[in-house]
């Protein structure tokens, strides 16, 4: 039996995201899915996240009501099952509450190109968590799924996300004109940042 994918020079079983818990000490990154245990309930947490004004503006979620949240969790389970994307809930290690999200998906699996994204709930912002989570999932994708190039996109006017990208070691590469449609709005420009698997990682300190 062949173990090679005819469309890639890499072994077919390398570029697969496998369900994993990433333990960062004070926070844990846990796979989104129906079985995820979040304090207060995973579905209410997703509905509340979608209603957050900053998230709705910069990173609109398709989880505005319980049925949509359940459908999202089903999609996460399916994508973990086939290894095509990796969506992690960022949770407080002490009390199990939801803090945010960090996710990866293949842009070009054969070439090892991955996209990374993130959002944080209001109470979790401003303490370096997005930078730490982005670094952790990126390093995991390089180490376990043979990610070769990791790309990060944000709206040109999302300055906070731009700073996260640079802090996490993703230099700015260029501006993509009219590349993404805002919810119910016009097409807008995005910044592209990226890092390579060969770029050195920097450890970001957690809370003292
Ligand atoms: C974008 C978003 C994730 C950034 O969150 P954040 O909390 O600012 O980012 P970080 O977790 O990296 O924290 C960085 C901030 O914490 C501060 N900070 C405190 N301790 C820190 C530490 N140990 N390391 C790094 N930063 C630290 C920094 O000063 C920094 O402030 P600054 O952004 O004003 O320079 C968040 O604002 C958000 O979820 N917004 C809505 C959704 C969104 O925009 N998603 C991204 C779409 S592309």
Image (cartoon, rainbow, N blue to C red):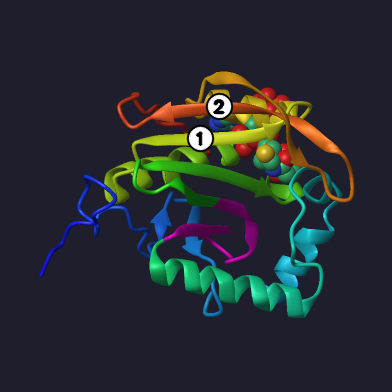
Residue 117 picture quarter: top right
Q: Main secondary structure of the magenta part?
A: strand
Q: Is mark 1 within 8 Å of ligand 1?
A: no
- In the rendered image, the residue lying farthest to the left is 1
| Viewer-closest of 163 and 1 | 1
Q: Which residue carries the number 1 mark?
A: 151
User: Does 77 sit left or right of 15 as displayed?
Assistant: right
| Viewer-closest of 119 and 205 | 119
Ligand 1 is found in the corner quadrant, namely top right
Q: Is residue 88 above or below residue 133?
A: below
- In the rendered image, the residue lying farthest to the right is 185
Q: Alpha-carbon distance for marks 1 and 2?
A: 6 Å
SS assignment at label 2:
strand
Viewer can see residue 38 = no
Residues at circles 1 and 2 in contact by the CB criterion of under 8 Å: yes
Q: Is residue 190 above or below residue 80?
A: above
SS assignment at label 1:
strand
Point out residue 179 in the picture as x, y percentages from the top left corner: 71, 35
In reply to whether residue 181 is colored magenta, the answer given is no
- The region drawn magenta spans 84-102
Residue 81 picture quarter: bottom left
Q: Earlier in the sequence, mark 1 or mark 2?
A: 1
User: Does 151 sit left or right of 65 as displayed?
Assistant: left
Q: Which residue carries the number 2 mark?
A: 193
Q: Within 10 angstroms of label 2, few (less than 14), some, or many (20 or more) residues?
A: many
Residue at coordinates 54% horizontally, 25% vertically from top-left? 167
User: Does 201 sit left or right of 166 as displayed?
Assistant: left
């Amino acid at each position: 039996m062949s173990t090679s994918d005819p469309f890639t020079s890499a072994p077919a079983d390398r570029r697969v995201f496998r369900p994993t818990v990433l333990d960062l000490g004070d926070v844990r990154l846990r796979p989104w899915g129906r079985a995820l245990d979040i304090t207060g309930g995973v579905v209410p947490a997703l509905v509340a996240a979608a209603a957050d004004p900053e998230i709705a503006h910069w990173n609109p979620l398709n989880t505005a009501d319980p049925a949509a949240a359940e459908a999202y969790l089903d999609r996460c389970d399916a994508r973990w099952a086939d290894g095509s994307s990796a969506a992690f809930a960022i949770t407080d290690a002490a009390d199990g509450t939801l803090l945010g999200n960090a996710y990866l998906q293949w842009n070009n699996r054969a070439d090892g190109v991955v996209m990374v994204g993130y959002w944080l709930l209001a109470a979790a912002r401003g303490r370096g968590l997005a930078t730490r989570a982005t670094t952790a999932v990126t390093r995991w994708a390089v180490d376990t799924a043979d990610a070769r190039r990791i790309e990060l996109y944000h709206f040109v006017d999302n300055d906070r996300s731009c700073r996260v990208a640079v802090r996490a070691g993703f230099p700015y590469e260029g501006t993509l004109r009219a590349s993404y449609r805002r919810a119910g709005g016009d097409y807008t420009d995005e910044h592209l940042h990226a890092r390579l698997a060969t770029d050195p990682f920097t450890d970001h300190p957690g809370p003292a």
